[in-house]
Amino acid sequence: MDELRLAAGKAADLMADHLAGIGEEPVWRPVPEADRLWLTGQDLPDAGRGLEELLQDVRSRVLRYPMGNGHPRFFGWVNSPPNPAGVLIEPLAAALNPSCAGGEHAGPLLERTVVRWLADLVGFPHRPGGGLLTSGASMATIICLATARQQAALRDGWDAREEGLAGHAPLVLYVSAEGHSCLRKAAELLGLGARGVRTVPVDGSYRMDVAVLRTMIAEDVAAGLRPFCVAASAGTVNSGAVDPLDEIADVAEQHGLWFHIDGAYGALGVLADGAAPTFAGMARADSLALDPHKWLGVPVGCGCALLRDPSQARAAFSLVPSYLIDDNADELGWFSEYGPEQTRPFRALKTWATMSHLGREGIVRLVDRTTRLARALGAMVEESADFELMAPVTTSITAFRHRPAAARDLDALNRALPAAVQRRGNVFLTGTRLGGEDALRACVLSPDTTEDDLALLLHEIRTAAKELVR
């Protein structure tokens, strides 16, 4: 233990130095060939290596090449900087190293509190046991859609777990054209196939078109198909758009469909000043997926599946072999009865630490600040003759397009710009396609980002564009 104690102190210093100095380093740098070969081509050592020697490798070969998301000028994808409380506490979860499948110990008990806190934050109705932490929203989505599939089958008088899907009317899931790819992946894994997913067009603000949704459901019913679920977005990754949740909830209720909301990134946006009306209807969902490791900054990976009725998820997943029967368990049973994971890590500890460290006021302040910055960037774009705003700024994502007079092919330019900006190392930007056009998108999640960083972002885009055009 002496070696561990000494190395742990050095690891703490290394961690603190990394986080303290990250803003002075390039946001991203390419990995030189020598270090790339070391990272990808090592042989397993014959003899074990000392802890301090391992730290030296991490210092020189790993920390030098971050993804970039700890930096205040990282605007890519939806990846937040880690909250320091989560960073501090996560090694203690590893020290305990429990399986949080269930049982009478700190892990599962603390998870009950964390899930309740998350539900309360976004205003989702929470019954005890009505949710569980997952590796991320992709797994949360699988849990929610599998629950929806089983409920649809039971309502029709059959059991999808026992019988499979063959011989029954094909199940149909409705997803916005701007819906996240995890929805389609979940549908494929659950046996619906790509043909079981209907893509609903969006309006001019990239929100699901509810009138078209109604028409598609009616057509599918007439064709002998079985609509069972509609999945809406509370904050898309392309533009941050929030679907008309209340209207979609009405359609789901009218047709007896499960109403799922993908709020992985955006559900916490409801906390921003004046945002509540945009998210009206979120409390009517049967299930909601969200990611504490996005806007909250909980170290990756921690997602959450919230369910209005926990017994429905249990009906979709519970399978308790004899060696796991626990006579001390309460009426809720084990977390492993509500999803596919049996051995489950202690995700709740870092999530509890992060949320406790921020407090409700700090969480609201973080969401409100980053949303305001995204709107400020949107205003800068609209005030600039060589930029074009591509979508309304609803959450903390600004989708826009560079339109310099010298560019002949705007799609080609905007498609090339993210990599060109990244290579310069001063800011990190990613792209997408909106309305059939290549676009840029900046997602603001860091509490340390400033308006000066936004101005630098536009400057770097202009500079990189001049090099590309030239």
Image (tube, grey):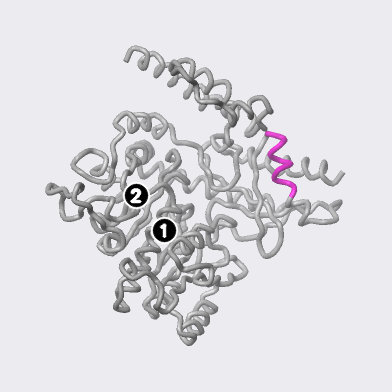
Q: Quadrant of residue 36?
A: top right
Spot occupied by residue 346 in the image (x, y as percentages of width and height): 32, 39
Residue 385 seen in the figure: no
At numbered mark 1, what does the secondary structure look like: helix, strand or loop? helix
Spot occupied by residue 211 in the image (x, y as percentages of width and height): 53, 79
> What residue is shown with label 2?
341
Which residue is rendered at x = 64% and y = 40% of the image? Answer: 428
The nearer-to-camera label among 1 and 2 is 2
Q: Is residue 314 above or below residue 426?
A: below
Q: Residues within 10 Å of mark 1 (few under 14, many from 20)?
A: many
Q: In this view, does 355 lie above or below 339?
A: above
Q: In which quarter of the image is the N terminus?
A: top left
Q: In this view, does 53 lie above or below 138?
A: above
From which residue to which does the magenta span run? 416-425
Q: In which quarter of the image is the C terminus?
A: top right
- Does the magenta run of residues contain 175? no
Q: In which quarter of the image is residue 63?
A: top right
Front-most of residues 437 and 389: 437
Spot occupied by residue 175 in the image (x, y as percentages of width and height): 51, 68
Q: How crowded is mark 2: few (under 14 residues within 10 Å), some or many (20 or more)?
A: some
Which numbered disc, 1 or 2, marks the residue that appears first in the sequence? 1
Q: Is residue 57 left or right of residue 50?
A: right
Which residue is rendered at x = 32% and y = 28% of the image? Answer: 95
Question: How far, Cα to Cα, is label 1 from label 2?
Answer: 12 Å
Q: Do the residues labelled 1 and 2 touch (CB within 8 Å)?
A: no
The residue lying furthest to the bottom in this view is 222
Front-most of residues 331 and 128: 331
> What residue is shown with label 1?
142
Residue type of the residue flagged with mark 2: Glu
Spot occupied by residue 373 in the image (x, y as percentages of width and height): 57, 46
Image mark for residue 261: none
Residue type of the residue flagged with mark 1: Ile
